[in-house]
Amino acid sequence: TPYLNIYSVLMQCGKSRLLAILNLLAHNAGTMITPSEAVVYRWIDGMPNPTLLLDEVDAIWSTNTGDNEALRAIVNAGYERGGQVPRCVNFTELQFFNVYCPKALAGIGQLPDTVADRSIPIKLKRKKASEPCERFRKRLPGVSDPAADICSRAEAWASPNIAVLRESWPELPECLSDRQHDCIEPLLAIADLAGGSWPATAREAFVRIFAGARSADDSLRLRCLSDCRDALGPGGDVQSSTLVARLQAIEDGPWQEQILTPNKLAWLLRDFDVKPLPLRFPDPIGQKRGYRWAEFEDAFSRYLPTPTTPNNPTATP
C-alpha cells in the first residue's frame, strides 16, 4: 500500500486538518504524534485492518531527534502485505508483530529517503487571506454525516470488487520508476475499475505529482547528477573546473552555497561510477582532468527520470 507524504515548508498549511479529515474517512484510523516504536507495532498488530495517521513527523525524523532508525524500519517494513518485525516478549518469548497497514505521514519538510520512496507526495500551501474556506468542525452533522456516508458507499463499492482488484494488472506510465509503479499500481487498478475519465486523469496526475517531487528532491548527489546532465549537453569533453563553473551558474542550484570544487564534484559523483579522467584538450589547455558525456550515460539512464511532456505524460523521447 502506498503511503501519503503530506508536507509543507511552514506551519499552518493544513496538514493536521487533512489528517483530521482522513481520520473520518479511513478504515479504523488512528492519529498519533511522536509515538514510540512499541506503540506503533503493538497498535497495528492489535487492530483489525487499521490506518495509521502520523502527525508532526518532522519531530520524529529531524536533526535534533536523530534518524529514529527503529521507527523508520517499522514504517518501511509495513509497506507490503506480510511485513512483520520480531520482538522479545516477557524477555524470552519471540513474537512477530504485523506492521502492514495504510499510512499517512504529515510534517514540515522532507521524509527520510527510504520512507519518501514508498510515498505519494502531497505538498500543501498556506491559504491566502483572499481564499474563503468554511471552518472545519468534525462534530457538526454537516461534516460527520457526509463523512459517514462516504465511508459506507466506499465499503459497499469495494466489497464486491476486491477479488477483481486483486487480479488486475493496470498499465503503468513508463516514465516513472519501479518504486513509483509499486506506489500507484493499486490506485490505478481502482481508477480503471471506476472507469469514465478516472483512468486517464489518475495517470496524468501521478506523472505530474512525481515530476514535482523530483524537482524538490533534496538529495545532493542526485541533484548533482541531474544538474550535470543539464550542464554538459550530449557529447563532448569538459574540464572539471569548467563543469564546476557551469553548475555554480545555475540560478536555483545549491552549488555556490555548497562551495563546490572539482574534488567535491568528484566525491558527489563517485557512487554513480563517474570519475574524472585525464583528457587532452586543444592548446593552450593541453591535458587536464575532466569528464566525458559517455561516462555519465549509464548513471543518467539508471537514476534520472525520462523527460515527459504534460500533454503526453507517458511518452518517451
Image: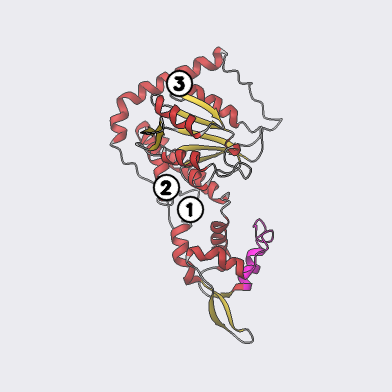
Taking the magenta stretch, the answer to whether it contains residue 59 is: no
Badge 1: how crowded within 10 Å, few (<14), some, or many (20+)?
Answer: some
- Asked if one can make out residue 221 in the rendered structure from this viewpoint, the answer is yes
Q: Which mark is residue 179?
A: 2
The residue at which mark 3 appears reads as 150
The residue at which mark 1 appears reads as 308
Task: Report helix, strand or loop for mark 3.
Answer: helix
- Of marks 1 and 3, the one in the foreground: 3
Q: Where is residue 168? Give x, y as percent.
A: 30, 38
Three-letter amino acid code at the position of disc 3: Ile
Magenta stretch, residue numbers: 241-262
- Are the two marked residues, 2 and 1, in contact with CB atoms closer than 8 angstroms? no
Residue at horizontal 51 percent and vertical 71 percent from the top: 275
Badge 2: how crowded within 10 Å, few (<14), some, or many (20+)?
Answer: few
Taking the magenta stretch, the answer to whether it contains residue 243 is: yes
Three-letter amino acid code at the position of disc 1: Thr
In the figure, is residue 130 to the left or right of 237? right
Q: Where is residue 289? Give x, y as percent.
A: 57, 77
Q: Report the residue that reaches farthest toward the top.
A: 141
Determine whether 254 is above or below 139 in the image.
Answer: below
Task: Looking at the picture, tell me which residue is in the foreground, 169 or 6.
Answer: 6
Residue 283, located in which quarter of the rendered image?
bottom right
Q: CA distance from mark 2 to mark 3?
A: 30 Å
Q: Name the image quarter holding the N terminus.
A: top left
